[in-house]
Structures are given as C-alpha cells and as structure tokens.
Image (cartoon, rainbow, N blue to C red):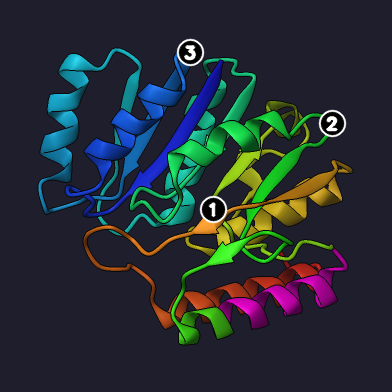
Amino acid sequence: MTCYVIPTLNEVENISSILESISQIENNCVIIVVDDGSDDGTQELLAKKLLTTSNLVVIQNNKGAGLGNALKQGIQKALDFSPRFIVTMDGDWSHNPSASKQLVANINGVGLLVGSRYTAGGVNHLSKYRLLISRIGAWLFSKSLKIKVSDPTSGYRVYNPEVFKKVQLKSIKSSQYNFQIELLYRISEAGFLIKEWPIEFAKRKHGVSKFKFRQVLASFKTLLQLKFNLR
C-alpha cells in the first residue's frame, strides 16, 4: 500500500482533480492532505470529499504553519498505516500524479527517490528567475554538503518508510521549503542511498504560487547550518 502526502494552501481549483487522478492510477492507497489554513474554500471542499472518499485523510493546520510542518505531519500520519512507500507531491498540478507510478516502481534498493527536474530527461517549466534561483541553490547544496542530488528542493519524492526508523521527523527543525533540504541531508547522513528519477515540473493549473524570496534565504541559512553542524 502507498500513502500519498499532499500539502495544500488555497488549492480549491486543483485539489479535487488531483485526488481523482490518484484514485484512478492507484487502487490501494491512502491520500493524506495537510491544509495550511486555506481561506479560498479548500477546507470546505475537503470536508465534503471526506464524506465520499474512504481512503482520504485530512489534517487542518492553522494558517502559516508552513510547508515543512505540513509534510512532517503528513509523513508522520502516513507511518501509522504501515505503508510500503510514502509519496509526497504538490497540490497544484506542477507534479502530475500519473508520474508517481513510475517513481514508485524505481525506488527499490534506496531510501529516497527524488523526482528531479534537472537529471537527464527531466523537464522544467519554471520562469527564468525561479529557474536561476533553483539551479544556484542546487549547486550550493551539492558543493557544500557533498551529496550528488541535482534537485534537492524537489517536493515530488518517494520515501521508503524504513528511513524513518533512523531519521526522526521530530528532529527536523525546518518548517518551510528548507524542510526538503534538511530531510534529504539527514537521510543521506543516516547512510541511506538516494536516487533521482526524471520528472516534468509543469506550471500550476490554477491559482497563484506561494513562492517567496524569504524562503530562499531560509534555505541558504539551513544549508550553512547543516554544513557547519549548527542544526
């Protein structure tokens, strides 16, 4: 059985079709949506979905809890189901649910499989500005921490639950986008293999991006703290 963890913030126009897409490609799964205090109708839509979707779990957070906290809660909840794999993905169609089947099929033998925009075969539809920031961040991560991962901030991932027997989620201090960097580092530090698989990162279908430049600064700060063992 596979658990899907999807963080949301104001995704009322996207989340319903994503849930339907996952259900069509994966019969035996649990879908965990962690909402960060949406005020656009996402919470109300999810409440209705709970009435008709037996494999759906919804966790409601106070607004501003952050992406990292949402992922942490979602993964922790997923572990309660003793899944074979845990898939994390965005809730805006930048990650196509149909790609998860191939990702899951290729995780064998590793602790974490990262869906990568930058490995051979990957496709990225970010703006030039976002692409530049992303590539610089990935280069700094690789050089600073000596981990050969081309897309360390990617949120499309498949985790082998075994990693969380050695990597305690409560020890991850990052609460925003920097959570992706810190958790990847801790998994590598614990001795698990990490593999990348090419994905297409599309433009969101509806709504607006939650990306803020301060998140870049927080990620760079986390990178320095990890490099010098300050976190």
Q: Which mark is residue 117?
A: none
Residue 182 horizontal/vertical position (percent): 67, 58
| Mark 1 surroundings within 10 Å by alpha-carbon count, few (fewer than 14), some (14 through 19), many (20 or more) | many
Which of the two discs, 3 and 1, labels the residue nearer the N terminus? 3
CA distance separating discs 2 and 1: 20 Å
Horizontal arrangement in the rendering, residue 175 relative to residue 184 (left or right) = left
CA distance separating discs 3 and 2: 22 Å
For the N terminus, give its image quadrant. top right
In the rendered view, tell whether residue 73 sits above or below residue 212. Answer: above
Q: Which residue is mark 1?
A: 155
Residue 130 makes an appearance in the image: yes
In the rendered view, tell whether residue 121 sits above or below residue 215. Answer: above
Q: Which residues are magenta?
A: 133-147
> Is 114 in front, or is 117?
117
Q: Secondary structure at mark 2?
A: loop
Q: Secondary structure at mark 3?
A: loop
In the rendered view, tell whether residue 183 sits above or below residue 34. Answer: below
Q: Which mark is residue 109?
A: 2
Q: Are the residues at dot 2 and dot 1 in contact (C-beta closer than 8 Å)?
A: no
Q: Secondary structure at mark 1?
A: loop
Residue 179 horizontal/vertical position (percent): 57, 57
Q: Which mark is residue 28?
A: 3
> Is 155 in front, or is 104?
104
* Three-letter code for the amino acid on which mark 2 is drawn: Gly
Q: Residue at x 58, y 58 (%)?
A: 154
* Three-letter code for the amino acid on which mark 3 is drawn: Asn
For the C terminus, give its image quadrant. bottom right
* Three-letter code for the amino acid on which mark 1 is drawn: Gly
For the residues carrying marks 3 and 1, which lies nearer the camera in this image? 3
Q: Are the residues at dot 3 and dot 2 in contact (C-beta closer than 8 Å)?
A: no
Which of the two discs, 3 and 2, labels the residue nearer the N terminus? 3
